[in-house]
Image (cartoon, helix red, strand yellow):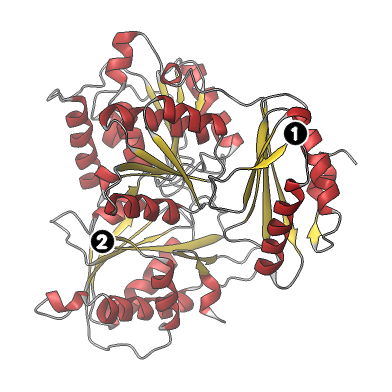
């Protein structure tokens, strides 16, 4: 098969377990070849072997709870050992912990690989790759896959087993104490905090971080790794998952609920009142923290954020930069702005991927929670909740997201044509105006007969889809916007508009 088809932006992703009619395309055989491409990239492009007298690379490997993890890890290890690589087998780990394997001096890995497919169903898996300078980019993954069939260096390496989560947890607890400006071993004594790991890799956080800091973790759920994800999808952007942690918080009368995705590069929370804090609300909480510490900072988000979020960030003295969706895109934009001398402390997507400048520009769900935990003692003294921090963030009356499959063989060209044509259509409409502060697709503000809100039409990052997001402050007005859009879309026969028809009740 063409290994290039496994590229998923700056990651590698595929089906690792046959499922129904879906054949596996990320098998141990493919992964063994990909390992050859990785070594070529690390040796020839990054020149990382030159720093070692022995000439061999040191690569760490970790994985989440997926059922295909062991077979894919073995394929990587076998291939690397044949290529004179010193392998550190970290076993169950998280994506942020694997990046830290390149930073912690006791490991000093040249590169680290996380075997994960984030929140996707159990039959998927994938590879995320880091060096000391950060995550691999799209061009790096393309190079690796292009060189997977090249001749491999043949010389024996080695493999040693380690557990990185102990060191990662200890580092995190130290950072939390410093953030609280305390030397108290148990600064979270008196707090009741529940963790929902969704049977992914985040269960460690309850015992190794929260309990170590003194928190009562009674009621924590789904901490045991189980790659079949029997309770709910481990995804903070999933309604069922968020309802699960919300119910646990209210049932146990906890101060806070924490939920992670499978590999812990995303997270969200529920406060003591049961308020769900994810998407725009999570961005608002983290923006409040960042702007208190770094007044005037810019904050990069992806494009589908509420108009009210922009007003909220500006009311706190900050500036929102809405950018292209994709966690690497928003992180790279943050790095670019800082390189230009524009202080930018946070990059975050509505999905929950959040990276802080102070934390290696790394999207780390556990560090997001660490920043929130640092606030808890102060909030308790004030008798307030996390929800109170963002009480001035206006909530829309209704939001909808519709996805339209592009049936044309030239997916990108067709999708971009629809977006361009929509721009001309909007110019002819009363009550609609294109928002110039937008870098992805077309964002349109609506008013008068369409209520008060906006819609965004953009290409999906990884699927042959156009994504339409509609938001309004007046109940019932999304329907009017969708009716107008239906008239526009009628002329595009290569769009599957079933979801729009369903939404309009036709």
Q: Earlier in the sequence, mark 2 or mark 1?
A: 2
Query: Which picture quadrant has residue 419?
Result: bottom right
Q: Position of residue 171 (x, y in %)?
A: 20, 42
For the residues carrying marks 2 and 1, which lies nearer the camera in this image?
1
Task: Name the residue beneath numbered marker 1.
Answer: 478
* On-image quarter of the C terminus: top right
Asked if 459 appears above or below 282 in the picture, the reply is below
Q: CA distance from mark 2 to mark 1?
A: 44 Å
Which residue is depicted at the point 56% across and 34% down? 306
Crowd around label 1: few <14 · some 14–19 · many ≥20 (10 Å): many
Residue holding disc 2: 133
Closer to the camera in the image, 273 or 138: 138
Q: Residue at x 40, y 45 (%)?
A: 264
Asked if residue 400 lies left or right of residue 37, the reply is right
Position of 13 relative to 397 (above/below)? below
In the structure shown, which secondary structural element does the residue marked by tag 2 occupy?
Answer: loop
Callout 2 touching callout 1 (CB < 8 Å): no
Q: Quadrant of the N terminus?
A: bottom right
Residue 407 horizontal/vertical position (percent):
77, 66
| Neighbour tally class for label 2: few under 14, some 14-19, many 20 plus, Cα within 10 Å | few
Q: Is residue 114 visible?
A: yes
Q: Is residue 182 above or below residue 331?
A: above
Q: Toward the viewer: 282 or 71?
A: 282
- Is 87 drawn above or below residue 199 in the view shown? below
The residue lying toward the viewer, choosing from 66 and 375, is 375
Label 1 SS: helix
């Amino acid at each position: 098969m063409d290994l290039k088809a496994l590229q998923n932006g700056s990651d590698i992703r595929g089906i690792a377990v046959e499922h129904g009619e879906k054949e596996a395309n990320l098998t141990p055989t493919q992964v063994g070849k990909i390992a050859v491409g990785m070594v070529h990239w690390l040796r020839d492009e990054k020149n990382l072997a030159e720093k070692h007298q022995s000439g061999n690379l040191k690569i760490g490997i970790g994985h989440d709870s997926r059922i295909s993890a062991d077979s894919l890890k073995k394929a990587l290890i076998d291939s690397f050992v044949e290529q004179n690589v010193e392998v550190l087998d970290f076993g169950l780990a998280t994506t942020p912990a694997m990046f830290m394997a390149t930073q912690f001096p006791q490991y000093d890995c040249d590169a680290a690989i996380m075997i994960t497919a984030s929140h996707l169903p159990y039959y998927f898996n994938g590879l995320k790759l880091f060096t000391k300078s950060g995550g691999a980019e799209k061009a790096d993954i393309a190079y690796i896959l292009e060189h997977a069939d090249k001749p491999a260096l043949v010389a024996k390496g080695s493999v040693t087993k380690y557990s990185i989560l102990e060191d990662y947890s200890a580092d995190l607890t130290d950072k939390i104490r410093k953030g609280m400006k305390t030397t108290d071993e148990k600064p979270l004594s008196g707090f009741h905090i529940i963790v929902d790991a969704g049977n992914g890799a985040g269960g460690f956080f309850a015992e190794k971080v929260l309990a170590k800091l003194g928190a009562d973790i009674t009621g924590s759920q789904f901490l045991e790794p189980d790659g079949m994800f029997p309770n709910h999808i481990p995804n903070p952007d999933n309604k069922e998952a968020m309802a699960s942690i919300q119910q646990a918080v209210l049932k146990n009368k906890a101060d806070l609920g924490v939920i992670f995705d499978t590999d812990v590069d995303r997270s969200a929370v529920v406060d003591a009142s049961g308020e769900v804090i994810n998407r725009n609300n999570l961005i608002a909480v983290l923006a409040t923290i960042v702007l208190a510490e770094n007044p005037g900072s810019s904050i990069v988000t992806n494009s589908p954020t509420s108009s009210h979020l922009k007003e909220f960030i500006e009311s706190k003295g900050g500036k929102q930069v809405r950018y292209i969706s994709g966690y690497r895109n928003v992180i790279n934009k943050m790095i670019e702005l800082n390189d230009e001398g524009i202080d930018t402390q946070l990059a975050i997507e509505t999905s929950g991927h959040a990276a802080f400048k102070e934390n290696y520009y790394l999207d780390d769900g556990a560090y997001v929670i660490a920043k929130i935990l640092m606030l808890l003692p102060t909030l308790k003294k004030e008798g307030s909740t996390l929800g109170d921090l963002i009480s001035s963030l206006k909530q829309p009356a209704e939001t909808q997201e519709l996805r339209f499959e592009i049936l044309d063989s030239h997916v990108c060209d067709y999708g971009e044509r629809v977006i361009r044509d929509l721009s001309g259509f909007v110019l002819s409409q009363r009550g609609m105006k294109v928002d110039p502060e937008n870098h992805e697709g077309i964002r349109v503000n609506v008013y008068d007969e369409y209520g008060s809100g906006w819609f965004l039409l953009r290409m999906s990052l990884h699927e042959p889809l156009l994504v339409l997001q509609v938001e309004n402050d007046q109940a019932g007005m999304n329907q009017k916007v969708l009716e107008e859009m239906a008239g526009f879309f009628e002329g595009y026969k290569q769009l599957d508009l079933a979801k729009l028809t369903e939404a309009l009740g036709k």
